[in-house]
Image: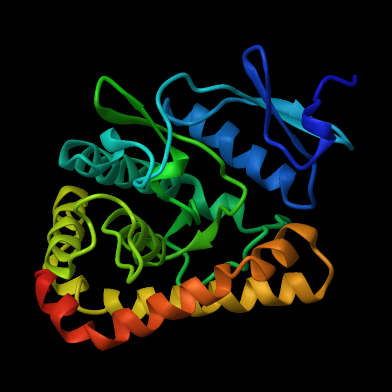
Amino acid sequence: MVIPSKDDGEGPVRHDDLVYRRTRPWTASVHSLLIALQRHDFANAPLSAGHDATWERASFLPGETGDLGDNENMRSMRVLQSAARLLRRYHDCTALFMRSMLEDQKWQLPPRLPFEVICHGDFAPYNVVLNSGAATGIIDFETAHPGPRCWDLAYAIYRWAPLSAGVVAKDLGELDTQILRARSFLNAYDLPSQQRSALPGMILDRLNVLVGFMELEAANGVERYRRNVEEGHADIYRRDIAYIKEHQNEIMAGFGG
């Protein structure tokens, strides 16, 4: 079966109601996750349509997508809060079957102790689908891996606040606004206050791990990451790490921990 085009690159490529992507060593684990989500009545993720040696297939989730910088709707507080509630429901669901996902599974990102949930790994605006002005779906589970809730939350907050020195999205460049959005995300997720003080440090850890992963993959000849490093993505993360370090105490206080 040869359907995908888009120069037959890494994808994803949509054809009718299916999304195709090149099969990778972690593809089987991702599809086991999608199947488990369906079995546990989590209806906000793509359905697995199988995979072979070349292509994996998942259902297309209709709706609006985009990032904070190019989609004004993604910047609304309603979307942010609904995204946080969606992430909480996803985490709660994966906690039900997480233990069954620990054996004989390969993941793109390394599992991280303690194992509480299956982290999405990249719960950012560009991986959320909107309908009627609210987050209704999660896509792109390529970076899913077992880990603690707050490990996934750390990266989600970094992206949704966003806690970045170089924000181009309108009205999101001020630290006070970023902290307010992060606290609103945590409130909507319903993270207990006593768990919040560790989050700024965990965001730093998460970004440092990401930079190390990108540079290792680039050095190993993985084209996607070689290109990302060449285009300066690792340098952007390093600038954000410095930004968060500089304001770590203020961020910690603002989170409400």
Residue 65 in the image, given as x and y percentages of width and height: 43, 32
Q: Is residue 255 above or below residue 47?
A: below
- Residue shown at 64% from the left, 73% from the top: 213
Name which residue lies at 49% across and 51% down.
120
Residue 67 sits in quarter: top left
Task: Say which of 45 and 185 sits in front.
Answer: 185
In percent of the image, x 10 and y 78: which residue is there?
253
Tell me where residue 121 appears, x and y as whole percent. Answer: 50, 56
Q: Quadrant of the C terminus?
A: bottom left
What's the coloring here? rainbow
Q: Quadrant of the N terminus?
A: top right
Residue 131: % across, % down: 32, 22
Residue 234: x %, y % from top left: 56, 73
Give whichever of 68, 160 is nearer the camera. 68
Query: Visible in this render: residue 113?
Result: no
Image-quadrant location for residue 35: top right
Q: Is residue 126 left or right of residue 182?
A: right
Q: Which residue shows up at 20% across the image and 60% down it?
A: 182
Decide if residue 174 is in sight here.
Answer: yes
Q: Is 80 rendered above or below residue 47?
A: below
